[in-house]
Image: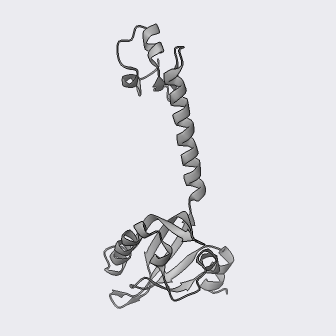
Amino acid sequence: MASLEQLLRALDEPVFEIDATGQVSYATPALTAWVDHDTDWIFSEVLEEGDRARFAQMLGRIFDGKTATLLLELTMLVHGNPMPVELKLVRGDRDGEKVISAVGWLRDVSMERAKEAAANVQGTHLLDLVENISDACVVENAEGSVEMVNAAFCELFHVEAAPQSLVGTACS
């Protein structure tokens, strides 16, 4: 039967074990490739400075026994470059009632963030187009509610309300 470590290596996932001080005692090759460290390093050192206090607070909640599992979005420094990650941290080994380790799993969410940013830009461009076109324009969503409408539409149909006040109303 394969050991847990063999399984983690085969999955090629960034997983680590950490103690209450934040020192990493085990890291899979997938994680060590991101951070250029093997073991015996402090996890918060590979986080952007603004995320270090949030991580310390999260780690404290696990080791104080206040929660068994936490999920947090952080920015890691991977080869010196910021990368958004999702960290799931769970209570690990115990010595009686005392938590002595936690296990973390990281997921790269940079592609998701890039898609969200692109969608926001597209939405902004569409909104600019709808608001500034001289023709009457209304955009409805799949449920049949107004998403965007311009002043020309309101003028054409003698609607006295501001275009923004129609957002969310039924198109029919």
Q: In percent of the image, x 66 and y 80: which residue is there? A: 9
| Horizontal and vertical percent position of residue 141 | 52, 29
Specify whether 117 is left or right of 166.
Answer: right
Residue 171 visible (yes or no): yes
The answer to whether 121 is drawn above or below residue 88 in the figure is: above
The answer to whether 125 is drawn above or below residue 94 in the figure is: above
Specify whether 39 is left or right of 9.
Answer: left
Res 118 → quadrant: top right
Of all residues, the one furthest to the bottom in this rendering is 95
Total labels drawn:
0
**Residue placed most toward the observer, 60 or 75:** 75
**Residue placed most toward the observer, 94 or 121:** 121
Q: In percent of the image, x 58 and y 51: which residue is there? A: 114
Of all residues, the one furthest to the front in this rendering is 80
Colouring chosen for the image of the structure: one colour
| Horizontal and vertical percent position of residue 98 | 34, 88
Q: In percent of the image, x 55 and y 64: which residue is there? A: 83
Residue 142 visible (yes or no): no
The answer to whether 159 is drawn above or below residue 150 in the figure is: above
Figure quadrant of the N terminus: bottom right
Specify whether 56 is left or right of 106.
Answer: left
| Horizontal and vertical percent position of residue 132 | 51, 22
Q: In percent of the image, x 51 and y 28: which residue is there? A: 128
